[in-house]
């Protein structure tokens, strides 16, 4: 056990280390549309994130589902103040992105420039340097946050080969973004099903750009809410980026579908909460006003909802791209608590297309953990074990529970987890300049 000072120092040390395809097809589509469309919504729900999460709930094996459940439970009682101090970022983090363009028509095979324009939008919106920040209403000005998160196209593929961060795959399928194969898998995420395989979703943000149809602009996966091979974001090419094909599709022509869906990817909910017609639930973020339902279009300010001035200009509402303006400090805390825990693999080793190709590739290190879920003890195997290495265990709110020095050079270490409350944790092994991480589930 560690005393409080030792724990605080250990926390600082650990944080410092790891911040571094005809009729048949048409019929199939018609049958599948309700699956991806949130039930009870109008026919044209623009974001299918919640519908995808509901469909996946029955497909996920433990421990992934257990972790998702822990997140669902944890978000209700999060103390935002405590969370903010526990996981406040010290430096800007960069997330490496791979964009998989899956196209049937030539128009869907969007240009590199259109992809670059999307990266530029993300880097403006997540850094509060978007050109329309001046449109934040005075009431919300103190809440508008720089999320201190940037995005780049990956310069290395998962095997360490030089890459552009862009893959292109022709498909025989129309609207592949909503097609489910007979075996239950979404076609878009699998090359053998006409889509494109993900790159190591632990270490890359995967974005699939493919026609979806049915009025859906895009969807993302909440942490733990999809099988790893399907983890990421899917955006229709008409609404991806701010140039090229997207320029012809206002009012969703300013790249903010991706801003919104990546928000979901980092566990941000719709600003009105899970229920689309209720003041009794919210988004689990303290500083976003309770709101009954989504806003569409570009309504005049102010709008009253649930007795509050509605923050309909938030990136997590459904307003037009030109009218979305901000994320809040509370959303920043929630996003960073996610990035520091269940999405921490994104921080392990990042190679951007803007850095020189040819630098040595740090080991993309995996940790084998068993049994998982664990009850009293978990066995760890990792090539990172050496005399200097440390093992850190964090919960979903960013609280450090364990910090152990690797006591032996054995290839298998046994970590006592009997004192951990049941739940979902992130385990890190820090050794030299290298970090490995994995999800640890403690069962009762
Ligand atoms: Zn959404």
Image: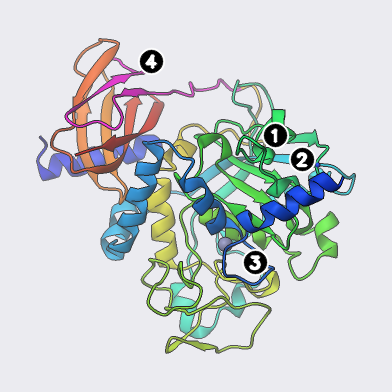
Residue at mark 4 to residue at mark 2: CA–CA distance:
36 Å
For label 4, count other residues whose C-alpha is less than 10 Å away and answer few (under 14), some (14-19) or many (20+): some
- Does residue 341 show up? no
Q: Residue at x 24, y 17 (%)?
A: 413
Q: Which residue is mark 4?
A: 383
Of circles 4 and 1, the one toward us is: 1
Is there CB contact under 8 Å for labels 2 and 1?
yes
Q: Earlier in the sequence, mark 4 or mark 1?
A: 1
Q: Who is closer to the viewer here, 376 or 325?
A: 376
**Picture coordinates of residue 362 (x, y %)?**
50, 23
Q: CA distance from mark 4 to mark 1?
A: 30 Å
Q: Dot 2, how many residues are within 10 Å of its Cα: few (below 14), some (14-19), or many (20+)? A: many
In the image, 316 versus 435, the foreground residue is: 316
294 lies above or below 58: below
Q: Nearer the viewer, residue 383 or 274?
A: 274
Q: CA distance from mark 1 to mark 3?
A: 25 Å
Residue assigned mark 1: 196
Describe residue 325's horizontal placement relative to residue 244 as left or right.
left
Instruction: Tell me if residue 278 is in the magenta stretch.
Output: no
**Quarter of the image with the C terminus in it:** top left
Residue at 67% from the left image edge and 80% from the top image edge:
298
Residue at the disc numbered 2 = 102
Residue at disc 4, secondary structure: loop
**CB-based contact (under 8 Å), mark 1 and mark 3:** no
Mark 3 lies on residue: 45
- Secondary structure found at label 3: loop
Of badges 1 and 3, nearer the viewer stands: 3
Q: Is mark 3 within 8 Å of ligand 1?
A: no
**Callout 1 crowding tier (Cα within 10 Å): few <14, some 14–19, many ≥20:** many
């Amino acid at each position: 056990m560690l005393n409080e000072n030792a724990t605080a120092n250990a926390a600082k040390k650990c944080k410092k280390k790891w911040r571094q395809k005809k009729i048949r097809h048409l019929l199939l589509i018609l049958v599948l549309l309700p699956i991806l469309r949130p039930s009870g919504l109008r026919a044209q729900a623009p974001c299918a994130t919640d519908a995808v999460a509901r469909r996946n709930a029955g497909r996920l094996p433990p421990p992934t589902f257990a972790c998702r459940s822990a997140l669902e439970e944890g978000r209700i009682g999060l103390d935002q103040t405590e969370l903010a101090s526990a996981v406040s970022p010290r430096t800007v983090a960069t997330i490496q992105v791979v964009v998989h363009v899956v196209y049937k028509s030539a128009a869907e095979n969007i240009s590199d420039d259109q992809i670059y324009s999307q990266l530029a939008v993300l880097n403006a919106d997540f850094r509060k340097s978007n050109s329309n920040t001046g449109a934040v209403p005075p009431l919300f000005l103190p809440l508008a946050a720089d999320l201190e998160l940037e995005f780049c196209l990956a310069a290395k593929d998962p095997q360490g080969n030089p890459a552009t961060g862009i893959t292109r795959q022709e498909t025989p399928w129309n609207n592949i973004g909503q097609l489910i194969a007979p075996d239950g898998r979404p076609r878009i995420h699998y090359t053998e099903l006409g889509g494109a395989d993900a790159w190591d979703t632990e270490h890359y943000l995967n974005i699939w750009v493919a026609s979806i149809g049915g009025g859906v602009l895009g969807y993302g996966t909440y942490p733990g809410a999809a099988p790893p091979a399907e983890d990421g974001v899917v955006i229709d090419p008409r609404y991806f980026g701010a140039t090229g094909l997207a320029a012809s599709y206002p009012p969703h022509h300013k790249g903010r579908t991706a801003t919104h869906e990546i928000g979901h990817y980092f566990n941000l909910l719709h600003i009105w909460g899970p229920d689309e017609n209720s003041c009794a639930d919210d988004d689990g973020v303290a500083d976003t006003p309770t709101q009954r339902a989504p806003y569409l279009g570009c309504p005049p300010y102010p709008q009253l909802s649930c007795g509050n001035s509605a923050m309909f200009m938030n990136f997590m509402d459904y307003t037009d791209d030109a009218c979305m303006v901000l994320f809040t400090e509370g959303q920043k805390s929630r996003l960073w608590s996610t990035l520091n825990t269940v999405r921490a693999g994104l921080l392990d080793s990042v190679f951007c297309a803007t850095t020189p190709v040819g630098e040595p590739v740090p080991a993309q290190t995996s940790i084998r953990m068993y049994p998982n879920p664990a009850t009293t003890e978990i066995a760890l195997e990792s090539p990172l074990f050496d005399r200097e290495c440390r093992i850190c265990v964090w919960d979903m709110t960013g609280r450090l529970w364990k910090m152990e020095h690797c006591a032996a050079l054995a290839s298998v270490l046994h970590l006592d987890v009997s004192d951990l409350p049941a739940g979902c944790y992130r385990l890190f092994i820090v050794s030299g300049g290298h970090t490995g991480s994995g999800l640890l589930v403690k069962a009762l």
